[in-house]
C-alpha cells in the first residue's frame, strides 16, 4: 500500500505563487509516475503535470510556462511550483502515483486564487 499526503495549498492573489508537496510512504517502487491533478467545482478532474522516474515531464497546456513539477526520489516526494497563478487555477489539487500494481491518490489540497 501507498499513502500520499499533500500540503502547501491555500489562498493567494492572482499573480502569486504557491508550492505544493506530496510525500509518499509505504511500498514505493523506484520506477513510477508521480503527478498532480486538479478538480474545479462542476468540472472533471484533469491532469496538471506528470513526472516519471527518469525525470521526463509533461504539462497541461494551460499551465505550461507557469508551473513546474519536480521530484525528490530519496524522499519519495513530488512538488508542484505554481507561479503567476490565475483565478482559473482555483481547484482541489490531488497527488497521484502510478506504479506496478497500483494507482494511488492523496486526499487533495485546496488552492484558491483571488482576482
Image: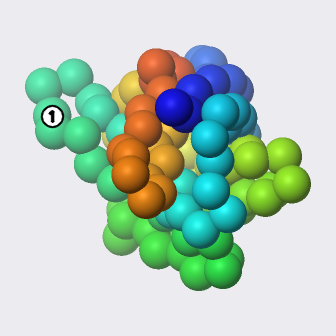
Front one among 15 and 57: 57
- Nearest the viewer among 41 and 97 is 97
- Image coords of residue 61 (percent x, y): 36, 70
Residue at (62% x, 56% y) in the render: 29
Mark 1 = which residue?
43
Place of residue 27 in the rendered image (x, y in percent of width and height, measured from the top left): 62, 41
Residue 13 falls left or right of residue 35: right
Q: Quadrant of residue 38?
A: top left
Q: Is residue 53 above or below residue 89?
A: below
Q: Is residue 64 above or below residue 42?
A: below
Q: Tell me if mark 1 has few (under 14), some (14-19) or many (20+) residues whose alpha carbon lies within 10 angstroms of its own.
A: few
Q: Is residue 29 above or below residue 60?
A: above
Left or right placement of residue 18 versus residue 86 in this view: right
Q: How many marks?
A: 1
Seen at 68% across and 33% down, the residue is 25
Judging depth in this view, the residue of 2 and 114 nearest the camera is: 2
For mark 1, give the secondary structure.
loop
| Residue nearer the viewer, 97 or 64 | 97
Question: Visible in this render: residue 108?
Answer: yes
Residue 35 in view (yes/no)? no
Q: Is residue 45 above or below residue 47?
A: above
Coloring scheme of the render? rainbow
* Residue drawn 64% across the image and 47% down it: 28
Q: Residue at x 37, y 45 (%)?
A: 103
Q: Position of residue 13 (x, y in %)?
A: 61, 28
State the image coordinates of residue 23 (x, y, percent, origin top left). 70, 35
User: In the picture, residue 51 is in which quadrant?
Assistant: bottom right
Amino acid at each position: 500500500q501507498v499513502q500520499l499526503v499533500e500540503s502547501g495549498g491555500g489562498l493567494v492573489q492572482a499573480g502569486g505563487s504557491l508550492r505544493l508537496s506530496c510525500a509518499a510512504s509505504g511500498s514505493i517502487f523506484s520506477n513510477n509516475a508521480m503527478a498532480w491533478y486538479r478538480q474545479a467545482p462542476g468540472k472533471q478532474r484533469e491532469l496538471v503535470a506528470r513526472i516519471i522516474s527518469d525525470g521526463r515531464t509533461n504539462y497541461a497546456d494551460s499551465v505550461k510556462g507557469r508551473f513546474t513539477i519536480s521530484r525528490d526520489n530519496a524522499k519519495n516526494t513530488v512538488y508542484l511550483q505554481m507561479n503567476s497563478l490565475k483565478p482559473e487555477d482555483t481547484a482541489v489539487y490531488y497527488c497521484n502515483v502510478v506504479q506496478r500494481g497500483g494507482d494511488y491518490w492523496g486526499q487533495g489540497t485546496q488552492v484558491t486564487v483571488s482576482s
